[in-house]
Amino acid sequence: MPCAPLLLEVYVRQWLRALQQREGRPIELGSVPDDELDAWARWGFTHVWLMGAWTTGAASRAESLALPELRPAYDDALPGWTEADVCGSPYAISAYEVPVEHGGDAGLASLRRRLAARGIRVVLDFVPNHTALDHPLATARPELFVGAPGPREGAIEVGGRWLCHGKDPNYPGWTDTLQLDYRRAATRRAMTETLLWIAERCDGVRCDMAMLVLSDVFARTWGHTAPTEREPGPEFWSAAIDAVRARHPGFLFMAEAYWGLEGRLCELGFDAAYDKHLTDLLHRRDRGVAAHLRGLGAANGQRAHFLENHDEPRFAATAPIAQHRAAALLTLSLPGVRFVHDGQREGRRVFARIQLARRAAEVVDEAIAATYEALARALSDGEIGRGDWALVEAAPAWHDDPTHDALVLVTWQGGDASRFSLVVVNASGARARGWARLSIAGLSGRAWDLEDLLSDERYVRDGDELSTRGLYLDVGPDAAQVFVFRAREG
């Protein structure tokens, strides 16, 4: 039976530091306590993204210390921080190797084995667009990078040559990085080899800013620099993904992607791409959530749905708990990759800067923690994430009532035709009414028991009415329900 991945993102540097403080002893990847991994397994996670596992070089770390605009951000994230807390961005990678202090590659391999024994797969970062300032390729093979003819804004001297900082077409360059040149076949080959090397050590990758290396996006960003012609070859992603899948058929590819290019990346082979638009709608409590999901249709199965990640503000910092509960249920109930950020389930509110190796201490929000525990039980007891899914049409309760447009309705059904789950979320701040038009085989001709796994609501409904008129819903703002339907015997 197909299962939608349920992924937890943990920032390795801050997570290991927090474990060390909790345990009162050194902790690296190979010595993470069993109770931490057991808790992930009990929650139902199928994948853990070890964000920031690779090495950041000294030059890129120095840039993180030198930029004056980052210091107020560090003050907000970690009052009383010192220079020792600044480790540099994990997306300025100088080597795809786990630092010795985090257990090295042996520690990663040990953790991967222990997670596999619990049914959890490991996802790591791949940063295709750029490297750290002190990546060995910058001096050994500078022709793989976008060069500059001499001193200029947006470039830095490395080994006697001027190389451009990594960037996207809309903003100045990231001054702790160097831009790889994807017009060159040699660069594409080198990064494919890097990706194959990573794939030997994990079960999937989250690809940073994946759309930047699409040929037309790259041309728009760097067309003013030499060389002006792209050396012949397929799109990087199609060739690279095919190369990995030839060796690792079940490997997971998840793209960080924006600008409406998500679908194109999935066509090139990605399993899922970020649905950042959904995240923004949920943060704004926008009633357009349902319309957005309906517009995606089957493509919802190729999206990563999330409330927050290391680039996004903490949801608990601005959303009341009812809104949080509804939004969390929705992201956990959709197909594709269901994505939870470390600290989200505990109600963390402080945005933790990725350039810092330590995060601020926060007290667990017990109400939010209890909400997520209830959601975890609902995921376990229902069919959510397992089997076949469908977005359900919501019809108006009566002809002049538009409130049904705020209802998001998702069904999940496994191999048992006498049982299915219906998720009901009102993503708006106002009451919503409508009819859920259910399309479940074998619905008519029998009675159905309905149980909401998130409350004490219980009903009995006639299957003939359910298959013709549907299920009538009248729910308050931020409603969040998981109905399990069970066919009555006889």
Image (cartoon, rainbow, N blue to C red):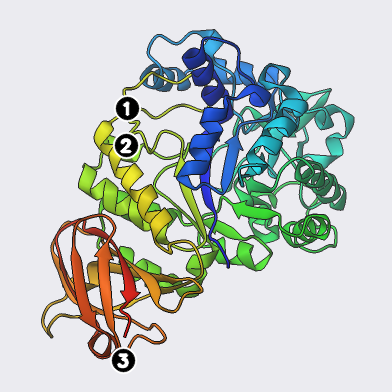
Q: Nearer the viewer, residue 212 or 54?
A: 54
The image's mark for residue 445 is 3
Give the CA separation, mark 3 to mark 1: 49 Å
Dot 2 falls on a residue whose secondary structure is helix
Mark toward the start of the polypeptide (2 vs 3): 2
**Is residue 291 positioned above or below 194 on the image?**
below
- Quadrant of the rendered structure where residue 162 is? top right
Q: Nearer the viewer, mark 3 or mark 1?
A: 3
Q: Which residue is mark 1?
A: 364
Q: Is residue 82 left or right of residue 227?
A: left
Image quadrant occupied by the N terminus: bottom right
Percent of width and height locating residue 17? 53, 18
Q: Nearer the viewer, residue 171 or 260?
A: 260
The three-letter code of the residue at mark 2 reads: Ala
**Is residue 282 positioned above or below 235 on the image?**
above
Kindly tell me whether residue 471 is visible in this rendering: no
Q: Are marks 2 and 1 in contact (CB under 8 Å)?
A: yes
Estimate how packed mark 3 is, as few (under 14), some (14 to 19) or many (20 or more) residues with alpha carbons within 10 Å. Answer: few
Estimate how packed mark 1 is, as few (under 14), some (14 to 19) or many (20 or more) residues with alpha carbons within 10 Å. Answer: some
Q: Look at 44% across and 79% down and name the residue there.
A: 417
Q: Which residue is mark 2?
A: 369
Q: Look at 12% across and 83% down and name the residue there.
A: 398
Give the CA separation, mark 2 to mark 3: 41 Å
Q: Look at 47% across and 16% down and name the residue there.
A: 22
Estimate how packed mark 2 is, as few (under 14), some (14 to 19) or many (20 or more) residues with alpha carbons within 10 Å. Answer: some
The three-letter code of the residue at mark 3 reads: Gly
Percent of width and height locating residue 402? 16, 75
